[in-house]
Image (spheres, rainbow, N blue to C red):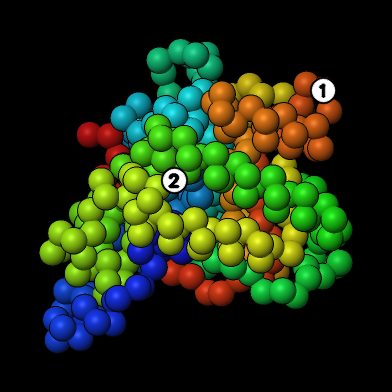
Amino acid sequence: MTLSRRRFLSLIGGGVIVAAAGGGYIGSRKATAAVAPWSLAGGYGEVRRDALSWALLAPNPHNIQPWRAELIGDARLALHLDPARSLPHTDPFGRQLTIGMGCFIELMRMAAAERGHAVELVLYPDGEDGPGPVALATFVPGAAEPDPLFAAAATRRSCKEPFDARPVPEAAAAALAEHGVVVTRPEDVQTLRDLTWEAWVIEMETPRTWKESIDLLRIGASQVDAAPDGIDLQGPFFNLGGTLGFIRKEDQLSLDSMGARQTYESYRSTMARTPAHVVQVSDGNTRRDQIEAGARWLRLNLATTALGLSLHPVSQALQEYPEMAGPYARIHALYARPGQTVQMLGRLGYGPAVPPTPRWRLEDKLAS
């Protein structure tokens, strides 16, 4: 994601450094290979590859991109959760990663439908706790109609910037109600602002969860192109700092660092400028429930994009580690009945245009 979510050093001093460097190539360049998958989507000439190339663009936690696909024969594929891509501290039970897999599957299904193909899925053929794939998919020609929401797939973004003060219109909230609980009443929005901010501070002030985010930093265009996942920080200051070594991941572990202080203030401002929220709840919490939650989150993302709105996941309060027990209990008391699980929580409003998030190429995600 771009420098908005964890703006570790903002652009403080950037102009001075760029001027000193003569405004050269290192400072001004942008990651290009990392965003190429957005323009390549759908251009592979084979329905499974085309569908997978779109699915790569799905939202997923920390941009970890946990998926891996294996083509089987002429019409099938197996989708695996890559065990090397995990978030053991913020997502100890893999719930959020599974939701990310659900987003991927839904976007794959929608992309196949654009070509008239249905996708017949068998989820967890070896059982939810088995060693096998998350899903086996068979592509069936002539068995599906295009989904209108797919038109927003190329421009969908997760916007981690402060939103405008203008409220979400009632008509838009009503249109999104099929995808989740849309919270617009000011006092309820303030309750969620306070809750999401508290949860975010807990994540930052818990050393192991903070380090998990720091480890995923990609500082400057060169690092982002080399590893197009995790949390990307780009712009002249970060490009120079990453290349010359004066901005280092390990320096951000201290909460007294300039980067951590900037992150704190930036995120506090972002949370405060939130006119509405969306909450998604499921009746159960099996892996299949989590896959379905991912499909719903993907469709919500596309629906908000189609309406000209922005969406930002703020699911820290839903994380399942001991320090987060208080916010977790409160969000469930507010929006879930006994036995239900709050699967996703997002900020909703009018945000600025943001660039596409880096992605690994399709070739990097196909099992050999």
Q: The C terminus is located in which quarter?
A: top left
Q: In which quarter of the image is residue 358?
A: bottom left
Please tell me which residue is depicted at 35% across the width and 59% down the height of the picture.
Answer: 258
Q: Nearer the viewer, residue 139 or 324?
A: 324
Tell me where residue 322 appears, x and y as whole percent: 56, 24
Relative to 254, is 188 on the left or the right? right
- Identity of the amino acid at label 1? Pro
- Within 10 Å of the Cα at label 1, are there few (<14), some (14-19), or many (20+) other Cα atoms? few
Please tell me which residue is depicted at 41% across the width and 40% down the height of the picture.
Answer: 210
Q: How many marks?
A: 2
Residue 135 in the image: above or below residue 199 = above
Can residue 9 be seen? Answer: yes
**Residue 62, numbered circle:** 2
Please tell me which residue is depicted at 63% across the width and 65% down the height of the picture.
Answer: 310
Relative to 176, is 14 on the left or the right? left
Q: Quadrant of residue 261?
A: bottom left
- Within 10 Å of the Cα at label 2, are there few (<14), some (14-19), or many (20+) other Cα atoms? some
Q: The N terminus is located in which quarter?
A: bottom left
Please tell me which residue is depicted at 75% across the width and 60% down the height of the picture.
Answer: 276
Q: Identify the mark nearer the N-term, 2 or 1.
A: 2
Mark 2, secondary structure of its residue: helix
- Identity of the amino acid at label 2? His
Mark 1, secondary structure of its residue: loop
Circles 2, 1 touching at the beta carbon (< 8 Å): no
Relative to 199, is 248 on the left or the right? left
Relative to 64, is 268 on the left or the right? right
Tell me where residue 12 appears, x and y as whole percent: 35, 73
Tell me where residue 92 appears, x and y as whole percent: 48, 25
Measure how far apart labels 2 and 1 are at the Cα level: 29 Å
Q: Name the residue under label 1.
A: 338
Q: Quadrant of residue 76?
A: top left
Tell me where residue 129 appears, x and y as whole percent: 49, 14
